[in-house]
Image (cartoon, grey):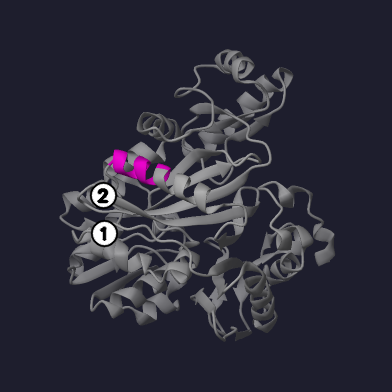
Amino acid sequence: MFNKILIANRGEIALRIIRTCKEMGIKTVAVYSKADADSLHVRFADEAVCIGPAAGKDSYLKIPNIIAAAEVTNADAIHPGYGFLSENAEFSKVCAENDIKFIGASEEMISKMGDKATAKATMIAAGVPVVPGSDGLLESAEHGMKLAKEIGYPVMIKATAGGGGKGMRLIKEESEFQKAWDSARQEAAASFGNDGMYMEKFVEEPRHVEIQIVGDSNGKACHLSERDCSIQRRHQKLIEETPSPIVTQELREKMGAAAIKGAEAIKYEGAGTVEFLVDKNGDFYFMEMNTRIQVEHPITEEVTDYDLIKEQIKVAAGEPISGRNYYPQLHSIEVRINAEDPANGFRPSPGKITNLHFPGGHGVRIDSHVYSGYVIPPFYDSMIGKLIVSAQTREEAIIKMRRALEETVIEGIKTTIPFHLKMMEDEAFKSGNFTTKYLDTWDFSVLQ
């Protein structure tokens, strides 16, 4: 087992990792930018090293600075959390070259799964269902139009290096193709330095359902059931839950088996998530694989009584997984509390928290790094916490979430709490009858 782990991240996920390390008797090193000097992960780690100025590119994304911090503190492993360098193949490679264990996927696995066209080809070879589309990258707009005729409109073109909805366009008919192609490639090149595009058939009335998997160094994998992440805005998740309201036990087992098949095909090591689209007929298609811990991992932990961070660390140290699959014993919902104003297009709202009170009670969990007096910097992702509730049934979990949200006080800034309160009263949400497109037509004026 590791003696000391450096956490190459910030905020709530850094604090989350520190807590598990303490329980395992492992010393921790926090790295921080100058803007994060007063963050709780800096206070609670055994050691802390400043790695640069406020901007992420000069600190949390600066590989030489992080490696230097690991070497000066004699850390024998690095946990990247999520975001920043968590799915950076070069970072994984550099860690290996410096004899520091990267608690995550190898350079090869990240490269295979990070490029969406390669990931799709890998899953096809493993026998995992995929959305009909191009075999690899499109050569030109003409190539795309010809293929679109074969598989039928509507189609989606997507940036192979994409994420967060960038470089993605829905095309309903051939007359729209060239314009969408040009704008998507331009956006992809600007955002990722890669304008490679691939195409998929557009799945109608889709649900976003992902399977949590864990693999070990022996090439074995298990799954921890599904999470439904269909409540999202502009491809950014806002609410997640498990089990999914639309997934039957039969579908759960099929999707779990497919996810394991895909993970074992690449001998995946660590915690990862295989993401699927589920259509209105209950058919599912591979979308992508995230080779890291997910923001929404706590709901899986709550319904399976399984510490995913602990399992990541154990697997990275060479220990085998238990080998069995885990199924939900409760219903759990997570809402992301962001420093944003949902009544005004989710405009960021950095600033000082003047008053703070988090909820409590049975089945209520808060993962957050903020406190009263904390100043939310404008340089990073706007998420300041995750509120997670668990109950015997979905209906009880919704009621508990509403109560917990009403009990939450965060003053001095705008947050997404008013939106989440409305969603807990929303008839479509309460019935479980919604798709990934639901918020596209949702009436945000009710928040004014």
Seen from the viewer's position, the closer of residues 361 and 171 is: 361
Q: Is residue 416 left or right of residue 18?
A: right
Who is closer to the viewer here, 318 or 417? Answer: 318
Question: Residue, x 54% and y 79% (percent of image)?
Answer: 363
In this view, 146 is above or below 275: above
Numbered disc 1: secondary structure: loop
Left or right, residue 325 beside residue 184 = left
Tell me the quadrant of the picture where the C terminus can be found.
bottom right
Determine which of the numbered discs, if any, sits on residue 220 in the image.
2
Question: Hey, what amino acid is under mark 2?
Answer: Lys
Check if residue 368 falls in the magenta segment.
no
The residue at 64%/39% (across/down) is 281
From the viewer's side, name the closer residue of 161 and 253. 253
For the residues labelled 1 and 2, the Cα–Cα distance comes to: 8 Å
For this view, does 170 lie left or right of residue 387?
A: right
Q: Position of residue 251 (x, y in %)?
A: 52, 47
x%, y% of residue 288? 47, 41
Q: Is disc 2 placed on a helix, strand or loop?
A: loop
Disc 1: CA contacts within 10 A as few (<14), some (14-19) or many (>=20): some
Estimate the x, y position of residue 388 in percent, counting from the top left. 55, 72
Q: Amino acid at mark 1?
A: Ile
- Horizontal and vertical percent position of residue 129: 47, 34
Q: Quadrant of residue 389?
A: bottom right
Q: Residue at (28%, 58%) from the top-left corner?
A: 103
Mark seen at residue 339: none
Disc 1, disc 2: CB below 8 Å?
Answer: yes
Image quarter of residue 346: bottom right
Q: Which residues are magenta?
A: 258-266
Q: Is residue 47 visible?
A: no
Badge 1 is on which residue? 321
Q: Residue at x 47, y 71 (%)?
A: 302
